[in-house]
Image (cartoon, rainbow, N blue to C red):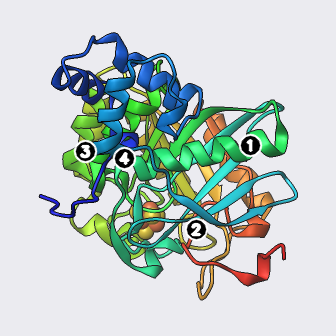
């Protein structure tokens, strides 16, 4: 229990259910929960004084115990391809959020789910910079609100259509907070993002996939190798949850009418051989999923390189020839270290605008 007299509940942590419970506690009508959601998420109000058509007495009481407080941006970068990277101060550390233009008027937001990451994957900057704790729902919601504001200020009419939990951290190791965040994100009275357009990416935390399946949330599995020895080398978590256990869980996940994507970072001379392609074809046919190939993005002090374009396209074509749906992820925000695997939670003066 927090004993600080000035401590207040942050309403940005509240799911629809929490708002309904709040109105019950105050003996108010249930529809007020909907109004509060609308004020906070549709009208972007953070100041209780601006809430004008809910009973004044209730708002005054609410103000005594609660606040609407988002995080703060400490740095922002915009790449030539209009990808935006926000560097954000959290309660415990610094995180990064990326807004990626995915068509003329739409953006995908890549959010962080933890302060850093404890899993230390060899191809990822986040893993090299330590773990500082989980993010609360309001810290994830803040990333969306701030990205939305930034996009509106810079591009006016552009809209957020997709959200991917592929930034810093392993979402399945912060699952309760992630599910609360998704509940707020997909609530039609709050941020109203279609659940089918929200994707959770996991390194394969087997015992948590069932919960994602029950909630029918699209899943992306960071596979990166079909060989346990190589996978354990680049993803130490594979020693705890080896391929067989992950793939069994993915089969169960798919049997519940869910959508699975396999992400495969292509690393030169490590996982790009003909044998790797054939193993990936076998595995994909068993799972009935699509594949996203990600050419390795450069990170500091890494021995890895991406294969050349010719080899990447040949890899893709062999999969296509086997009737597998496969795309190559475009490099976005690479000049501002915002591409896949490059988020570090550090301010890099090399990219500063000032
Ligand atoms: S790839 Fe994901 S799970 Fe691995 S260290 Fe980076 S953030 Fe963590």
Looking at the image, tell me whether mark 1 or mark 4 is earlier in sequence order: 4
| Residue 245, numbered circle | none
- Mark before the other along the chain sequence, 2 or 3: 3
Which label sits in the foreground, 1 or 3?
Answer: 1
Q: Quadrant of the C terminus?
A: bottom right
The residue to which callout 1 is attached is 151
Indicate the position of residue 195 as horizontal and vertical percent values.
Answer: 46, 25
* Residue that label 3 marks: 176
Separation (CA) of disc 1 from disc 4 = 21 Å
Tell me the residue at 52%/22% (across/down).
52
Is there any visible trace of residue 136 in the rendered image? yes
- Which residue matches tag 2? 343
Q: Residues within 10 Å of mark 2 (few under 14, many from 20)?
A: many
The mark lying in front, picked from 2 and 1, is 1
The image position of residue 163, as x and y in percent, is 55, 39
Quadrant for the N terminus, please.
bottom left
* Image quarter for ligand 1: bottom left
Q: Are marks 2 and 3 in contact (CB under 8 Å)?
A: no
């Amino acid at each position: 229990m927090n004993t600080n007299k000035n401590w207040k509940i942050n309403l940005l942590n509240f799911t629809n259910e929490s708002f309904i419970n709040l109105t019950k506690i105050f003996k108010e009508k249930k529809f007020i929960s909907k109004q509060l959601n609308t004020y906070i998420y549709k009208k972007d109000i953070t100041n209780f004084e601006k809430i004008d058509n809910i009973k004044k007495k209730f708002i005054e009481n609410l103000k005594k115990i609660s606040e609407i407080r988002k995080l703060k941006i400490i740095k922002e970068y915009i790449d030539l391809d209009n990808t935006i990277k926000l560097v954000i101060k959290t309660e415990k550390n610094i995180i990064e959020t990326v807004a990626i233009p995915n068509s003329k008027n739409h953006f995908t937001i890549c959010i962080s789910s933890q302060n850093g990451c404890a899993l230390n994957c060899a191809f990822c900057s986040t893993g090299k910079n330590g773990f500082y704790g989980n993010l609360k729902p309001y810290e994830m919601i803040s990333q969306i609100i701030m990205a939305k504001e930034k996009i509106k200020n810079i591009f006016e009419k552009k809209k957020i259509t997709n959200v991917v939990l592929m930034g810093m951290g392993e979402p399945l190791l912060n699952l309760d907070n992630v599910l609360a965040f998704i509940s707020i994100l997909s609530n039609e009275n709050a941020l109203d993002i279609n659940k089918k357009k929200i994707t959770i990416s996991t390194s394969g935390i087997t015992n948590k996939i069932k919960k994602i399946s029950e909630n029918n949330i699209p899943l992306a599995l960071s596979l990166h190798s079909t060989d346990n020895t190589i996978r354990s080398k680049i993803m130490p978590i594979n020693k705890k949850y080896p391929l067989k256990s992950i793939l069994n869980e993915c089969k169960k996940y798919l049997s519940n009418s869910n959508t699975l994507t396999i992400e495969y970072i292509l690393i030169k001379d490590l996982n790009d051989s003909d044998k790797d392609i054939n193993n990936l074809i076998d595995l994909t046919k068993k799972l009935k999923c699509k594949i996203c190939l990600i050419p390795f993005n450069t990170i500091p002090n890494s021995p890895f390189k991406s294969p050349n374009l010719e080899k990447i396209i040949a890899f893709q074509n062999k999969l296509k020839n086997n009737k597998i749906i496969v795309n190559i992820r475009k490099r976005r925000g690479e000049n501002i270290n915002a591409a896949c695997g490059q988020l570090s939670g550090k301010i890099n003066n090399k990219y500063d605008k000032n």
